[in-house]
Structure formats: C-alpha cells, structure tokens
Amino acid sequence: MPEATLFEKYSVDTNVIVSFLGDGPDELYPIDAFAPQWNVLAAAFKDGRAVAAKRVSTELKKWERLDRVKEWRHGHRFVFRDIESDEQLVAAKAIVNRYPAYGLDMNQLGDLEVMALAKARGLSVVTLESTKQHSQARPKIPNVCEEFGISCMGLKDFLREEGGAEIGLTRITPAT
C-alpha cells in the first residue's frame, strides 16, 4: 500500500487553493492581501506536507482562464496524488455507499477523492466547507470526515498549526 510519505500531513480541498488564486467571489483570500498565509500553504505543498487528490487538479482546470491558476497547477504537478491503493478505493466505496451523491455528481467527485486519500494515508483534510447545510443529497466534507473518522480542519486551523505566530494567528486568551 502506498502510505503517506514521511512528511505528508494534509489532503487539501480545491476550494482552499481557489480561495487564494481564484477571482470574484471564489477569491476569498487574494494573494496580494494574504501573502503570508499563502506562503504557509505554498511551503507545505513544496515540502510535501500538503498534497491533493488528482481530481483537485482536474477541478482547477475550471479556473485556468486565470494565468495564476494555470501556472500554479502546471508548476505543481508533484502535489497531486492519483488513486494508488485498495485502501483509497475501500474508503471511497464506504463513503459513496453512505452518500450516493458522491457517485452521481461529477462535481462531488473531488471531495470524495480528497477524503479517500486522507483516510487511506492517515492525513487531515483541509477544506473551507462548513458543517452547515449537510444533507444526504449535499454532503459536506467536515460532517462526512467526522462520520468516517477522518481528521478534518478548516484553513485557519491549518494556518495556526503550520504558521502560528509568524503570521499572526495565535489564539488570544481573554483576560480574567
């Protein structure tokens, strides 16, 4: 079984990458304003701590009208992991059996691969999805991860874990 490399810790969802590199409402954290945060994510990709499912690369094609997305995607092919193990297939099958929407909608396939990669390799999923509006027809990554025992975190928790004080994301304890 291809296990996580020594450094792999995170399986990153497409929405995290697009939140920095996208445009319009998809660009939640424009690189010019959030350069330190992007640099933490970029370093994690470069060092092999963060990886992404192969389907994330496919999903990024939607934004290739933007040169920065196209350049990043093509310059970071080393980030993307294909389905390489029975464990990934077993995880994907279990998730689809519980949430058939993942097998019926091509737009949901990326989420399935992100979670299956994390489950098979013992990684934490990093996503911008919230637990709100979770349903059988529109499952949300954090809810599914919790149900299947997959570690999951939002971007801010990833940044705290990886970047901490260097980017100003330390937790402040209120004075008593």
Image (tube, helix red, strand yellow):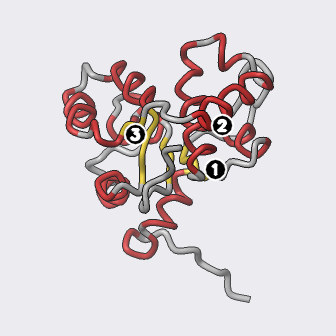
Left or right, 100 with respect to 163, comes to right
- The answer to whether the residues at label 2 and label 3 have Cβ atoms under 8 Å apart is no
In the structure shown, which secondary structural element does the residue marked by tag 1 occupy?
A: strand
Residue 135 lies in what quarter of the image? top right
For disc 2, the marked residue is 141
Nearer the observer: mark 3 or 1; the answer is 1
For disc 1, the marked residue is 152
- The answer to whether the residues at label 1 and label 2 have Cβ atoms under 8 Å apart is yes
Instruction: Tell me what residue is drawn at x 65 percent, y 29 percent.
Output: 92
- Circle on res. 65: none
For label 3, the crowd category at 10 Å Cα-Cα, with few meaning under 14, some 14 to 19 and many 20 or more, is many
Q: Is residue 118 above or below residue 9?
A: above
For label 2, the crowd category at 10 Å Cα-Cα, with few meaning under 14, some 14 to 19 and many 20 or more, is many
For disc 3, the marked residue is 17
Instruction: Tell me what residue is drawn at x 52 percent, y 74 percent.
Output: 170
Image quadrant occupied by the C terminus: bottom right
